[in-house]
Amino acid sequence: MLEVRLQKRFPQAQDSSAFELNTQFSVDAGTTVLFGPSGSGKSLTLDLIAGFSKPDSGRILLNDRLLVDVGTGVFLPPQQRSCGYLFQRHALFPHMSLRENLAFAATSLPKLERHRKVNQLLEAFQLTDIAGRKPSELSGGQRQRCSIARALVVAPSILLLDEPSVGLDTPLRHDLYDILGRIRNEFAVPTLLVTHDLEEAFILADQMLVLLEGRIVQAGTPREILSQPATAGVANLLGLFNLLPAEIKFLDPGNNRSRLRWNDVELEGPYYPARLLGDRVTVCVRRDEIAVTPKMGKPEKGALVLTLEAASETARTALLHFNGGLIVELPLEEYAENRHHNEWTLNFPTSTLRIL
């Protein structure tokens, strides 16, 4: 298990604002994804764990072995930390072949053990037939596989991956995901992976840590975080939610009901414990949880009729933009059949109205 408690400060300077990383978390078996936007401190966190940067305060424990303790002056160099690190740019030695790159990373092993381990990983990552090539003679996916094999050659206690899919096309991304799944199942190495790609986090993560402005603001499984974002910042980062400023107008705990006024419209919601009439809240509702159909005749009670302001399409879905910044997502085929409609009927399922 990896246990981390770190602080690192960068004071304000010319052309750069102040930044402070202040984070505490643990990583156990499986894959933990450190998820956040650019500039939130994700790569800095990996560098501090690996020993490429020194924290201002805090400590790091890996399998009960102290790697860093600022208070007592403990700071193990990177080569003594048993951390396999995969850099964004692979960082393979350009003058060495694949086999030589792996062998160099395994110099701490006895010669026969080193030779056996290098051969095992070349075979495991389907690199045996190209082991004599230099990095410049390889595809991006081959370089990626070699980098992962090199990180594993000394049997690290944890694998640190800094946005490993950057620069890979879709087929290579999925090859990488298969490899990381094999590492989890076959090598049993705990993994801490940095990404700002939500789909990647859902594919890979057993646990997810959301990092915003240098702090862990939510932890849980990807499904838990998607079901209930802890803050408006998390919901904005996920990019799948509407955040609607509203006022609580009615509360009925006995029937698990409430009414919320948003943009001169009343929405039916569940009962919200620890809330009072008149409280101003932010309603958080996922774009794909709002039921939307073209307006046909008189709408049902409680339905909302809005005029479509704009629509945008992705490969699989359409995003419908309405007044008040409301966005609704629906399957592309369904929108394509009804794109000529200007007025749409919206229904907010009661259980989907979370408040922040």
Image: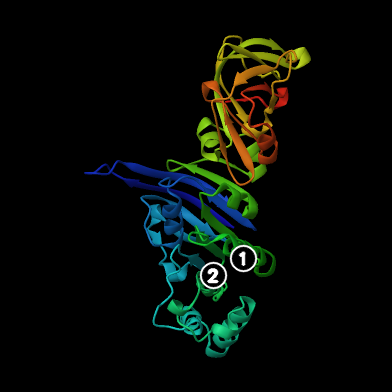
Q: Earlier in the sequence, mark 2 or mark 1?
A: 2
Q: Compute the Cα span from label 2 to label 1.
A: 8 Å
For the residue marked with disc 2, what is the amino acid?
Gly
Q: Please, is residue 34 above or below residue 116 in the view?
A: above
Residue at image point 41% right, 62% down: 51
- Count of numbered circles in the view: 2
Q: Quadrant of residue 64?
A: bottom right
Q: Residue at x 64, y 53 (%)?
A: 203
Q: Height in image: 163 above or below 5?
A: below
Q: Quadrant of the C terminus?
A: top right
Q: Determine the secondary structure under disc 1.
A: helix
* Front one among 117 and 236: 236
Q: Which residue is mark 1?
A: 175
Q: Residue at x 39, y 56 (%)?
A: 72
Residue 176 coordinates in the image, percent (x, y): 59, 64
> Residue 316, labelled with which disc?
none
- The chosen color scheme is rainbow
Q: Which mark is residue 141?
A: 2
Query: Which residue occupies the foreground of this view, 322 or 175?
Result: 322
Does residue 151 sit above or below 7 in this rendering? Answer: below
Q: Position of residue 284 (x, y in %)?
A: 59, 27
Asked if 10 appears above or below 152 in the picture, the reply is above
Tell me whether the residue at label 2 lies in contact with that at label 1, contact meaning CB atoms closer than 8 angstroms: yes
